[in-house]
Amino acid sequence: MNTNSNVYTIIYTTIVVVVVAAVLAVAAMAFKPMQTANVKAETLSQMMVAAGLGSMDEFLSIGNDQVLERYSENIDSAYAVNLEGDKVLDLDTEKDNIELIDNFKPQDKAIKANGEVTLPVYKFKSGITVIPIYGAGLWGPIWGYIALNQDLRTIAGVYFDHSSETPGLGSKIKDEPWFKEQFVGKVLDIDTPGNPFDIVKGGADENDNSAVDAISGATMTCRGLDAALDVWIGAYANYLKKTTAEE
């Protein structure tokens, strides 16, 4: 075959594309279990940081297997609830079969549409209950975990993360200890529909026990986090009220 012909070029290019695609597909399949394990361990780590069971640096250092083991040893029960606050699904907490609900984007849409949701609740043996939040920052998704004391109102700890917020500004929701520390001891106002918690630009009123200071220079990220807190805490409000009443 004439290697300078158009036919040769087309055939050669097609073969190269097919071979590369096949190699990438095989590689993706080979690495998928590892990627899934990494995502699960990262999710559990974030949750446990909020619950006060360790630091992110510690969880990164001990490896995925130990992260799963620590979660399984410390979790009391995990399940999902609907917008009415009723339990609809149990989640396995055994180390080798840990179940999570961590695809929050569809849940976020369903909450806003007052649709059918399965909102995860993680209750630890320490008495801490952890619930997630999810929303939109300036450049992409933001999410986090809120740890609550036994009264299911008082915040025991938080962890926030993002996909692409501005370094040194919006990224501070994850990176700045002072921002997260100011949530501890604050109270969710779940009796105020639509506004259970505030992140206040310019500084929160020191007498407001349901508000914290926003990050200077990160207005849009803090606004997105504030909205996420309102939407998701609002979605859990019936569950929090029912559970407190029952206990």
Image (spheres, rainbow, N blue to C red):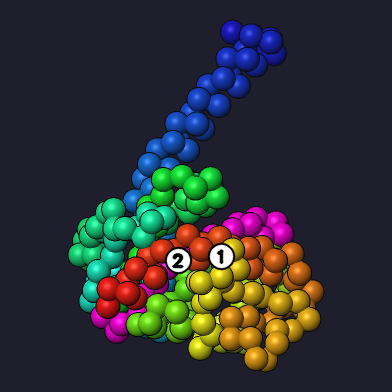
Q: CA distance from mark 1 to mark 2?
A: 9 Å
Start and end of the magenta stretch? Answer: 125-143
Is the C-beta separation of discs 1 and 2 under 8 Å? yes
Residue at 63 percent of width and 63 percent of height: 227
Q: Is residue 131 magenta?
A: yes
Residue at 56 percent of width and 65 percent of height: 193
- Quadrant in the picture for residue 86: bottom left
State the residue position of label 1.
193
> How many numbered callouts?
2
Name the quarter where the N terminus is drawn.
Answer: top right
Taking 169 as reference, is 231 left or right? left
Taking 45 as reference, is 233 left or right? right
State the residue position of label 2.
237
Please state the horizontal and vertical placement of residue 187, each as a whole percent of the image: 51, 82
- The type of residue carrying mark 1 is Pro
Q: Is residue 244 magenta?
A: no
